[in-house]
Each structure stands twice: as C-alpha cells, then as structure tokens.
Image: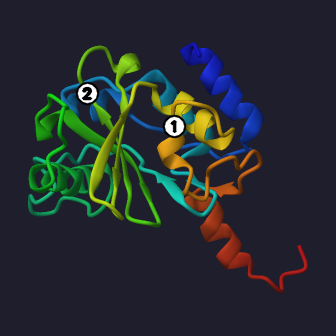
C-alpha cells in the first residue's frame, strides 16, 4: 500500500475531528533527534495528536527531549524521549534475534495498555522504516515491513502480514474509538452529567 494510500485509509477508518491535531516544530524535533521522521507519522500527529486508539494504543507525541537528554536537569518529563530510552533498555535486555540493529536504531512511536511497545527501526529513509513491536506477554520482538499507518490499517482491518496482532483489542476493529489527551481533558472537565 503506498504511503499516501495508507494514510487516506486511516482517515477513512478514523475521520479526524476539528482541533484534533498537534502543532509541532518539526525542525526543532528533528534537530534534537538528528533524524527526520516519517511523513505518515507527521500526518497522524497533525490530524489526531497523541491519539489513543481503541483504549489500547497511544501514539507518542514528538518532543525535543531525546533518550540522551531525558535525564538532564529541567528536562520536561514523559514523551517520546523517555519511552524510547526505556525501549532501548528493553532491547538491550531482550535483544531480538535475527534483527541486525543497535538499540540506538530504535525509536518508539506508541505504547499499549498491555505494555507492548511500537517502534521504528530507523535504518534507511524515514518513509521506509519498518515497525517493530515488543510483546510484553512473551518478551518477543516482531518486525513488520510496513510503515506506521499501513501497519495500523492492516491491524484494524484484520489484513494479512500482521497476524501476530490478532490477540490485541485493535484486531479487526474497523470503527475504533479514538481520542487524544486534549479531548480526554475536555471530557473530564465537562463531566458525565453536563447537559451539553
């Protein structure tokens, strides 16, 4: 599935809502990380923000804090830098077999309620980075040779090539719930008994 086609397919499955995206200073983020990020990830952030899909998979927002700077005094807590640092520690402790990569090649773009980790293997051009998933239940890494949005669409539509995701809540979920942190905050502020 071409890059644009997979993002369009995701838009059809999860129509973005007004003000759902995040504005990001990509030049600052990419300078901090010393790499470009994939176009489909930038589109997801622009349209959905740090979206939680199916109350299961949270897309991690980009930050200028990296794994190398997350422990510096005054570094804002949380975000991609911290979760990627944890992922790289996991990679070193449970190194995947038959995958030729260093921990520094891994960047985390999402995390699941099950503690599973969703990452890129940042080798080659950003729009060709494969998705890596760490399954917490059986301590295994699986590589999927799809970009992020194609991976998500395949899981949500129960397509071939991602069958290892069959036991997750997203498998075949053609109309998943989704909301970002700003939408969750607004919902909490309004409350369940609000007339509007």
* Direction from residue 102 to residue 172 in the image, left or right: right
Q: Is residue 160 above or below residue 78?
A: above
Q: Is residue 150 above or below residue 91?
A: above
Q: Which residue is mark 1?
A: 162
Picture quarter with the C terminus = bottom right
In percent of the image, x 11 and y 60: which residue is there? 71
Q: State if disc 1 and disc 2 touch (CB < 8 Å).
A: no
Q: Is residue 101 above or below residue 23?
A: above
Q: Which residue is mark 2?
A: 122
Q: Name the residue furthest right.
A: 195
Give the percent coordinates (x, y) of residue 100: 14, 28
Quadrant in the picture for residue 98: top left
In percent of the image, x 70 and y 27: which residue is there? 9
State the separation of the CA atoms marked 2 and 1.
20 Å
Give the percent coordinates (x, y) of residue 51: 56, 51
* Direction from residue 104 to residue 117 in the image, left or right: right
Give the percent coordinates (x, y) of residue 192: 79, 82
Other residues around mark 1 within 10 Å, as few (<14) / some (14–19) / many (≥20): some
Quadrant in the picture for residue 27: top left
* Direction from residue 94 to residue 63 in the image, left or right: right
**Which tag, 2 or 1, sits closer to the chain's start?**
2
Q: Nearer the viewer, residue 175 or 52?
A: 175
């Amino acid at each position: 599935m071409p890059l644009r086609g997979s993002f369009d397919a995701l838009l059809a499955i999860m129509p973005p809502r007004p003000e759902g995206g995040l504005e990001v200073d990509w030049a600052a983020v990419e300078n901090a990380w010393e790499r470009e990020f994939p176009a489909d990830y930038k589109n997801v952030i622009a349209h959905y923000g740090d979206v939680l899909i199916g109350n299961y998979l949270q897309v991690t927002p980009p930050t200028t804090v990296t794994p190398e700077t997350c422990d510096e005094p005054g570094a804002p807590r949380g975000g991609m830098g911290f979760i990627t640092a944890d992922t790289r520690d996991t990679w070193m402790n449970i190194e995947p077999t038959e995958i030729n990569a260093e921990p520094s090649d891994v960047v985390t773009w999402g995390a699941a309620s099950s503690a599973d980790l969703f990452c890129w293997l940042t080798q080659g051009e950003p729009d060709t980075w494969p998705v890596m998933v760490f399954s917490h239940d059986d301590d295994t890494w699986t590589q999927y040779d799809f970009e992020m949005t194609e991976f998500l669409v395949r899981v949500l539509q129960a397509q071939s090539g991602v069958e290892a995701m069959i036991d997750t809540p997203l498998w075949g979920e053609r109309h998943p719930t989704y909301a970002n942190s700003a939408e969750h905050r607004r919902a909490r502020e309004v409350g369940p008994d609000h007339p509007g």
